[in-house]
Amino acid sequence: MNLSMVTCLMWWSGTTA
């Protein structure tokens, strides 16, 4: 997994949550 991918997922999760 790429770090950018993880960051994007974390950001996306924070936006949806």
Image (spheres, rainbow, N blue to C red):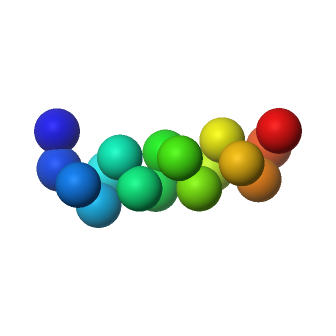
Residue at 80% over, 43% down: 16
Relative image position of residue 12 (x, y in whole percent): 62, 50
In the image, is residue 1 above or below residue 15?
above
Viewport quadrant of the N terminus? top left
Q: In which quarter of the image is residue 13?
A: top right
Residue at 53% over, 47% down: 10
Locate residue 5 relative to residue 11 in the image: left or right.
Answer: left
Relative image position of residue 6 (x, y in whole percent): 35, 46
Relative image position of residue 14 (x, y in whole percent): 71, 48
Locate residue 9 relative to residue 15 in the image: left or right.
Answer: left
Relative image position of residue 15 (x, y in whole percent): 76, 53
Locate residue 2 relative to residue 4 in the image: left or right.
Answer: left
In the image, is residue 7 above or below residue 13?
below
Residue at 29% over, 61% down: 4
* Residue sitting farthest toward the left: 1
Viewport quadrant of the C terminus? top right
